[in-house]
Amino acid sequence: MPHTGHPRDISDARLAAELLKAEHPELLYELVELARESFGFFSQCTSHLLTNPWFADALTELAPGDHLLDMGSGLGPVPVWAARRGVNVTCVDSHPVVRAYPIQDDWTEWGYFDYATISNQMRSFNVSVDKYKSKLTYSAISSVCVFSHIARSQRDHIIHQYAHRLRAGGIFCIAVDLLAGTNFIWNRADKKVVAPPEEHGSITDLLSPMMDAGLVIERLEVFRNIKDRPDLFMVAGRKPQ
Ligand SMILES: C[S@@+](CC[C@H](N)C(=O)[O-])C[C@H]1O[C@@H](n2cnc3c(N)ncnc32)[C@H](O)[C@@H]1O
């Protein structure tokens, strides 16, 4: 599918250049197609060119019938990509703005979207992730650029609570923005400061609750000097068998 004309959609020229340097061009291409089909755009923001294929790659082990919980889904292609593989996907997002079809020019990655309108493999809950209640055991949990907007004590609690909801061998993947040139977690939500950087915490303060909850850190990557964007940290931890 070519450029959709949506104001947020990546241009075809940019996409071609990004595919040439991508670590997983086939995944990136598939994710762009799915995002354009589902939401009318694949974000031209560089962070999304990094996070989406990274998460899809980390989640390729999921098999049909597995269950993925995606926290703070907004409008992103990874949950749709997993559902296309037969994975049952639960999406949770607390945003007050509900994005419902038809696609609008003002749609962004932020908002509550009911993924059940795309696939019956998916369901969505318009609730804060700490308030979401479920008795399911998950094969994987993903959280793409959400925890930076959540206060540290709540973040620690969510990581702890959900690490315990993973099945043995399950994987917990997290991406957070970082204040540029530092290891401090991005500390703004909707342009408001959540807490001063030292209080909001650093990479170490994200890894500690993961390890305390018994997760074994498998992948860990920091991206710096992203054009017009904060730095980015991505980590995947696995619950031992
Ligand atoms: C930067 S967007 C990321 C969207 C998507 N994960 C992506 O990577 O494109 C952050 C999303 O997290 C959601 N969010 C923030 N805090 C949340 C919370 N406590 N519970 C559920 N969703 C939350 C916001 O509403 C928003 O849609």
Image (cartoon, grey):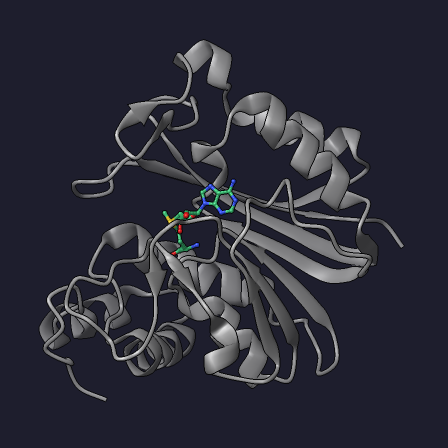
Whether residue 180 can be seen here: no
Q: Position of residue 111 (x, y in %)?
A: 36, 55
Left/right placement of residue 232 relative to residue 55 reads left
The residue most toward the right is 241
Give the residue displayed 14% in from the left and 72% down from the top.
Answer: 6
Q: Position of residue 203 (x, y in %)?
A: 52, 27
Left/right placement of residue 122 relative to residue 183 reads right
Q: Position of residue 202 (x, y in %)?
A: 50, 21
State the image quarter where residue 230 is shown.
Answer: top left
Q: Nearer the viewer, residue 179 or 75?
A: 75
State the image quarter where residue 64 is shown.
Answer: bottom right
Q: Is residue 151 above or below residue 141?
A: above
Q: Position of residue 107 (x, y in %)?
A: 23, 63
Give the residue displayed 41% in from the left and 70% down from the top.
Answer: 77
Q: Nearer the viewer, residue 241 or 110?
A: 110
Left/right placement of residue 102 relative to residue 77 reads left
Looking at the rendered structure, the number of numbered marks drawn on it comes to 0
**Quarter that holds the C terminus:** bottom right
Give the residue displayed 23% in from the left and 66% down from the top.
Answer: 18
Whether residue 6 can be seen here: yes
**Quarter that holds the N terminus:** bottom left
